[in-house]
Image (tube, rainbow, N blue to C red):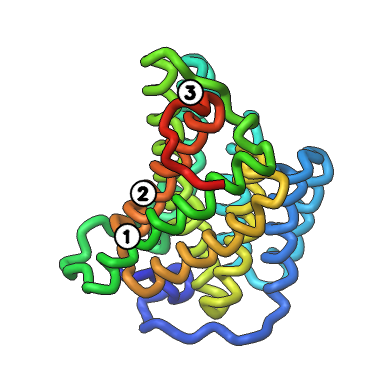
Amino acid sequence: MGVDKSPIGSGTATRMPPRASWGLVPAGLVSASAVLLFGLQFQLAGYVVLGAALLLAFVINRALFRDLLLIALGLAIVSTISVEADISYPNMALMGIVLGLAVLGPYLIARYVYRTHAIRFPIRTGQRWSVLERWYLVIVVILGWLILPTYFIRSGSYENWPAVTAPDEIGRLFVGVGFVGIWDELFFICTVFALLRRHFPDWQANLLQAVIFTSFLWELGYQSWGPLMTFPFALLQGYIFKVTKSLTYVVCVHLLFDLVVFLVIVHAHTREWLPIFLY
């Protein structure tokens, strides 16, 4: 299944969005609101910018307004909690519910209120992965092994995740890292990127979603020089989804990367464990 880039409610064929439009202003403000909400944690300013973005979109383009409203809804839901790494049982349950609603809410409105398939989760595409796509999965693990230990340990960002030594703590960290990785693809790629692609060229939509993606990961714990890694990663994930049209594939890429993240965090807190990294 591809991504519906036609106007909401239209049964017409896919059209190419204009390279430049006034709609970039409210869309850019939505991305900026994510920087305020998650990156800088200026909640009030973030909500003001988000509201201004929707008001401006309503004036400029009603179809754009409807899609930005869905993105804004998801961002607002996520902003009701802290997404800092906390693997206590109550917080994991709360975070699971809130993040789930941030995906489910926009999807249900798009599907049953707007009556469009703009948000899709293409798990089975019917296409086999190419040799290059299979090798890329291996490359992701190698790149993670080369980059992540240096980033987490030298920047000290591993301290944004709790030290885990007990079996249940290790299990919760593993599940938490994986869950957030899957959610990232459901929300930032299949929801935000897919909705933005209906109004802007793919490269513009990708840049806009990558800003939101990176802002969320900053609050999660990828701080210091983390955005130099997470922003290109977000762009790559958007591009890969555009090419493969497969949620399954981008999730596999993300989970392999997150597997290395998990191993590095465990090692960084307890250096005698998993001494397999260079940094």
Q: Nearer the viewer, residue 90 or 53?
A: 90
Mark 3 → mark 1, Cα distance in angstroms? 28 Å
Near-viewer residue (178 or 55): 178
Q: Return the mark for residue 256.
A: 2
Q: Amino acid at mark 1?
A: Leu
Q: Residues within 10 Å of mark 3 (few under 14, many from 20)?
A: some
Q: Nearer the viewer, mark 2 or mark 3?
A: 2
Q: Are marks 2 and 3 in contact (CB under 8 Å)?
A: no
Q: Residue at x 59, y 86 (%)?
A: 18
Read off the residue under disc 3: 92
In the image, what residue occupies the spot 51% across and 41% down? 102
Amino acid, disc 2:
Leu
Q: In this rendering, does residue 92 appear at all?
A: yes
Three-letter amino acid code of the residue under disc 3: Met
Residue 73 position within the rendered picture, expressed as x and y whole percent measured from the top left: 59, 46
Q: Up-down: is 156 above or below 248?
A: above
Q: Is residue 246 left or right of residue 211?
A: left
Q: Residue at x 55, y 69 (%)?
A: 206
Residue that numbered label 1 is attached to: 137
- First of labels 3, 1 by sequence position: 3
Is 52 displayed left or right of 14 in the figure? Answer: right
Q: Residue at x 46, y 29 (%)?
A: 96
Secondary structure under tag 2 reads helix
Spatial CA span between label 2 and label 3? 21 Å
Query: What x and y, as percent, mark residue 142?
Result: 40, 57
- Residue 261's tag is none
Asked whether 62 or 35 is in front, the reply is 35
Quarter of the image for residue 227 reads bottom right
